[in-house]
Image (cartoon, rainbow, N blue to C red):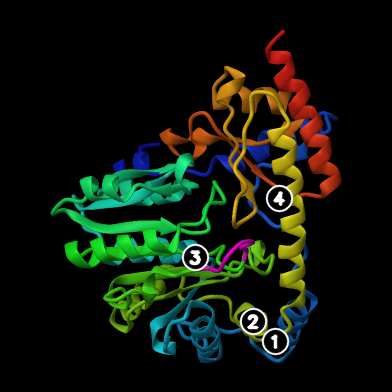
Amino acid sequence: MKLAERMSRLGTESAFEVLARAKSLEAEGKEIIHLEIGEPDFDTPDNIREAAVKAIWDGYTHYSAAQGIVELRNAVAEVDSRRKGLEIKPEEVVVTPGAKPIMFFGMLALVDEGDEVIYPNPGFPIYESVIEFLGAKAVPIQLHESKGFSLDVGELKSKITSKTKMMIINSPQNPTGGVIPKEDLEAIAALAVENDFWVLSDEVYSEIIYEGVHNSIAVFPGMRERTIIIDGYSKTYAMTGWRLGYGVMPAELAQAMTQLQINATSCTCTFTQVAGVEGLKGDQAAAKAMVAEFKKRRDVIVEGLNAIDGITCLLPKGAFYVFPNITGTGVTSQELSDKLLYEGGVAVLPGTAFGSFGEGYLRLSYANSVENIRKALASIEKTVAGLKK
């Protein structure tokens, strides 16, 4: 079969590939502890599930407006205005099946072939994938462990050219769990205004934060008219399978994104949107309890990793990932991740799954029980010790 040339530029997410290998090993009878997949291990809160069931029986099973039902766009405007410190209007909100379409539609609407897009590395692999799929130039900006996995603003300045159309930021971050400091966000904002480029701000982990508060780049002067905020339900409300996300952007761009939605998906599932209203405006106790439990797990896994000879690990401030430095083990990220899976029974991701600057690191998701995390740590310690024999 001869596929279109552009398909050769489309990447993937290694997490799903590692998950498939891990499942194959489990089918052979091997016990595997899953720390590879970026998915909360909690159920969707009861009030959200009940709202969805009621919506089905109430007849919310037909097409909705392509931009999203007005009740949900009103809820996003009300709640996110408060959470993010912005004045958001319903006409500035586009609801999509998951958060990824906002990323895809945003770049489709704004980025031409030959334009340059700066993106974080290590970072979510779909950023680079979409940039290259569109025929634009992907320009990586390194996230530095020495800066808490933020970027160097001087280095960023050197990456900006007359062809820079957009920059992607993600805070709290996948895969590092790092949070971009407010002063760095302010510096990025100033560069965006000065050089007239868009910022695609991935804020899907904004409600999973342990120290400090979340800061959106859109609050800085001149940024509302050049920022697309990506957000959604998968992480905050353990709703990965529901495929419910949204973007906040200038109203004129929202209309263009809605046109893309009409061409791609028609609309987002109507009864999940009704459930989404309950998610934002209903009881937040379950979501807060999940974050509190993640914080406990974070502390366990960071302490355990730092106790292993050859591994060091920063304390992440958000999301539910750690990104330990494994250079002291003497092997590559891929070699250690393979050994942990096939010999140690622990599924993790090599740092290189998130870009070339991920070499020397692993990504572990602590969306698993404390009991399993402790078992995984014991296996990691044993596997690493075996490398030195």
Q: Secondary structure at mark 2?
A: helix
Give amino acid for label 1: Ala
Q: Nearer the viewer, residue 122 or 311?
A: 311
Image quarter in which the N terminus is found = top left
Label 3: how many residues lie within 10 Å, few (<14), some (14-19) or many (20+)? many
> Closer to the N terminus: mark 3 or mark 4?
3
Q: Quadrant of residue 102?
A: bottom left
Q: Which residue is mark 3?
A: 203
> Closer to the N terminus: mark 1 or mark 2?
1
Residue at x 73%, y 32% (from the top left corner):
307
Q: Is residue 204 above or below residue 334?
A: below
| Chief secondary structure of the magenta portion | loop
Disc 4 + disc 2, Cβ < 8 Å: no
Q: Which residue is mark 1?
A: 55
Residue 332 in sight here? yes
Q: Is residue 8 left or right of residue 114?
A: right
Q: Which residue is mark 2?
A: 271
Q: Is residue 201 above or below residue 279?
A: above
Give amino acid for label 2: Phe
> Closer to the N terminus: mark 4 or mark 2?
2
Assess whether residue 5 is covered by the magenta stretch: no
